[in-house]
Image (spheres, rainbow, N blue to C red):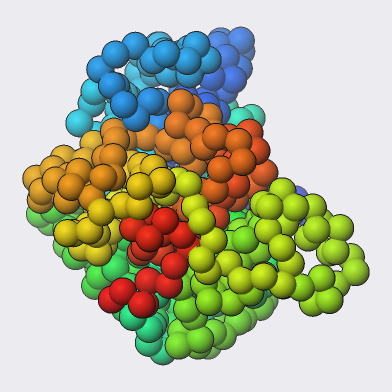
Amino acid sequence: MSRTIFDKIWDRHVIQSIKDGPSVLYIDKHFIHEVTSPQAFAGLKKRNIGVLRPGQIVATADHNVPTLHQELPIKEELSRLQVETLKKNCADFGIELYGLGHPYQGIVHVIGPELGITQPGMTIVCGDSHTSTHGAFGAIAFGIGTSEVEMVMATQCLLQSKPKLMRINIDGDLHTGVVSKDIILYIISKISSSGATGYFVEYAGSAIRKLSMEARMTICNMSIEMGARGGMIAPDEITFEYLRGRVFSPNGQDWEYKLACWKELHTDEDAVFDKEIHTDASEIEPMITYGTNPGMGIGVTGHIPALSEIGEKEKNSFEKSVQYMGLEPGSRIKGKKVDYVFIGSCTNSRIEDLRMVAEFVKGKKKADHVEVWVVPGSKQVEKEAIREGIHHIFEQAGFQLRQPGCSACLGMNEDKIPAGKYCISTSNRNFEGRQGPNARTMLASPLTAAAAAITGEVSDIREFI
């Protein structure tokens, strides 16, 4: 019987199937951070039970950490409490913590792949919706709730119902200036922010196979933004070369054995999906959002839909959204003045993203009225950016290279966008207040964000390269 890659990994991890109910699924790796773990640890303590397999948990501090002066005590009281609580809980339960000051500290979905912890064929969970990032390696990876975090800590298992399966095929060649962030924003704009609800998505096609691992991670990261349970891409030689020699990757004979197993992880040619979508890569242009969910996106040269283009059921929410954003239905977004540019988050804060931006801005200066924050996803990314001299390029352009953390993605730490200000962001969500109370967020690729930083307005990167 022909099977998808999802079926193959799922079946290997089902310990027990409950009749007319969920399956007991074994979890290979569990990532935790300071926001969704305190209640789980408290639950374990209340029940006087321990963590079953602490060696399979990886902990880091990312959401609430400052991105300036990390050597100093955290100023915000709640942030400081959460980070200190994580530190104590990890010590109490014997869990390795990559906290502030550790060379492996960073955003949870950045450090897992770059350290070689994330590997093909795994089941991976975290109390964070963007755990789908790890699916780029051919893993079943998804976010879980706090009670489920406790369940995995206690049992290394999780009760899960098998989702429906969708395949999204992107074939053909991308135009110059169009990158992976544009691909996923385009897909979400076409199927909506709820178009994949109930599905686990496999991305396939010639355009996907040509992407680097870091680009694939960006696409899988935002699967959740169209309602999917997660996203994944079958591993190939690009995957294997990325993993070779990383800190926690297998080596020697173990590497050869694992490699042979990983090469079996692919969808059979005649496997059937519950839903399948085909997209021509040549149709995609640099994308940007104009509203308050990631599905409200358009090509940078396009126009915001007019009211006459919106269905009756969506009109109220559409009007509320563009009113919040201070934009006019039917108007063009290109040329809109911006105040902040944020390059970072678990979507676009890897070294490849920083190199992309640095290559474009080298020898240029940011617009005087724009504040630009570049926040690396990890200490490893920060170290490499400094080693390559990228920090000098940013400094000369007037960009501020900060220290690793989730930063302005979610307004949970000190890095907030002021009320009413427009921010072009490489993060994954543009909800009301996501980057701070009444902040206005436009999602875009690192290249489109860099162009806005230089010109001071929404610009078409293709006009400059």
Is 430 situated left or right of 241 in this image? right
Q: Residue at x 65, y 38 (%)?
A: 438
Is 280 situated left or right of 195 in this image? left
Q: Residue at x 59, y 20 (%)?
A: 39
Residue 342 in view in this figure: no
- State which quarter of the image contains the N terminus: bottom right
- The image shows residue 365, relative to residue 273, as above or below, that is above
Name the image quarter holding residue 127: top right
Q: Residue at x 45, y 46 (%)?
A: 340
- The image shows residue 383, relative to residue 228, as above or below, that is above
Residue 290 in view in this figure: yes
- Residue 221 percent location from the top left of the image: 47, 56
- The image shows residue 152, relative to residue 443, as above or below, that is above
Q: Residue at x 85, y 72 (%)?
A: 311
- State which quarter of the image contains the C terminus: bottom left
- Residue 294 percent location from the top left of the image: 61, 59
Is 315 situated left or right of 171 in this image? right
Is 365 situated left or right of 349 in this image? left
- Residue 244 percent location from the top left of the image: 16, 58
| Nearest to the observer: residue 70 or residue 306 | 306
